[in-house]
């Protein structure tokens, strides 16, 4: 009986050890997949502030696609996350902005009388309320047309009266863009895909 009891205890110990090993391997694998996805495919970002109202609210969390721009170029209307230019006041050593691409390389962009003009034409911004006004800034001065250089993109916040954006610091380089926002996943009552906007 003693031998049988010891054998049973040994088998139980072996089973428990195998369970812990398999469980640990599963956790390590899951974490490895998460890290790979985070580094190369998608990452979560939080909307901080009101610069993207009414389309994105403060405190919303979204997923940013980091892969698309490895194979293609940002398009007008894309909502992108990018590393803030060094000139920007950031509370951390590094911070990221969420804005919308308005001008791509070769575009001519101008702010005049509260409106945005793209390549000589009034820009159709139906994704914004009609009463939203676009003020000029240090870079986008009133009535001065700016040419977007190759490899750079002009990004503006949707809430033009409460957004520090390309009107102040100018276009950003493609290398600064982390990715394209494509899915809002929190709060749960506002879960949605980021709609495609064509400008």
Image (tube, rainbow, N blue to C red):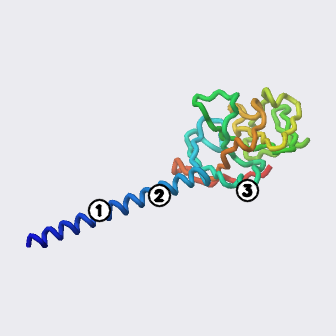
Look at mark 3 in the image and give the residue it sits on: 71
Q: In this view, does 32 lie to the left or right of 127?
A: left
Q: From mark 1 to mark 3, how far is it between C-alphas?
A: 46 Å
Q: From mark 2 to mark 3, how far is it between C-alphas?
A: 27 Å
- Tell which circle, 2 or 3, labels the residue nearer the N-terminal end: 2
Residues tagged 1 and 2 counted as in contact (Cβ below 8 A): no
Q: Residue furthest right?
A: 120
Q: Is residue 193 left or right of residue 104?
A: left
Q: Where is residue 98 in the image (x, y as percent from the top left)?
A: 66, 41
Q: In this view, does 110 lie above or below 151?
A: above
Residue closer to the observer: 72 or 35? 35
- Tell which circle, 1 or 2, labels the residue nearer the N-terminal end: 1
Q: Position of residue 197 (x, y in %)?
A: 74, 51
For the point 74% across and 44% down, which residue is it?
174
For the point 63% across and 35% down, which residue is it?
50
Q: In this view, does 105 lie above or below 72?
A: above
Residues tagged 1 and 3 counted as in contact (Cβ below 8 A): no
Look at mark 1 in the image and give the residue it sits on: 17
Q: From mark 1 to mark 2, how far is it between C-alphas?
A: 20 Å
Dot 3: element? helix
Q: Where is residue 147 in the image (x, y as percent from the top left)?
A: 87, 38
Look at mark 2 in the image and give the residue it sits on: 30
């Amino acid at each position: 009986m003693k031998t049988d009891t010891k054998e049973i205890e040994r088998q139980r110990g072996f089973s428990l050890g195998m369970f812990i090993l398999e469980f640990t391997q599963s956790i390590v694998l899951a974490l490895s997949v998460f890290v790979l996805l985070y580094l190369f495919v998608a990452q979560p970002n939080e909307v901080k502030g009101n610069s993207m109202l009414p389309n994105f609210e403060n405190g919303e969390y979204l997923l940013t696609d980091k892969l698309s721009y490895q194979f293609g170029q940002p398009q007008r209307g894309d909502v992108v996350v990018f590393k803030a230019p060094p000139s920007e006041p950031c509370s951390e050593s590094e911070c990221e902005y969420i804005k919308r691409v308005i001008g791509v390389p070769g575009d001519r962009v101008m702010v005049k009388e509260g409106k945005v003009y793209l390549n000589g034409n009034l820009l159709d911004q139906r994704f914004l309320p009609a009463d939203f006004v676009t003020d000029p800034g240090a870079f986008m001065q009133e009535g001065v047309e700016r040419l977007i250089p190759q490899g750079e993109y002009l990004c503006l916040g949707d809430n033009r009266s409460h957004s520090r954006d390309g009107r102040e610091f100018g276009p950003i380089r493609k290398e600064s863009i982390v990715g394209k926002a494509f899915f809002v996943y929190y709060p749960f009552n506002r879960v949605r895909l980021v709609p495609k906007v064509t400008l």
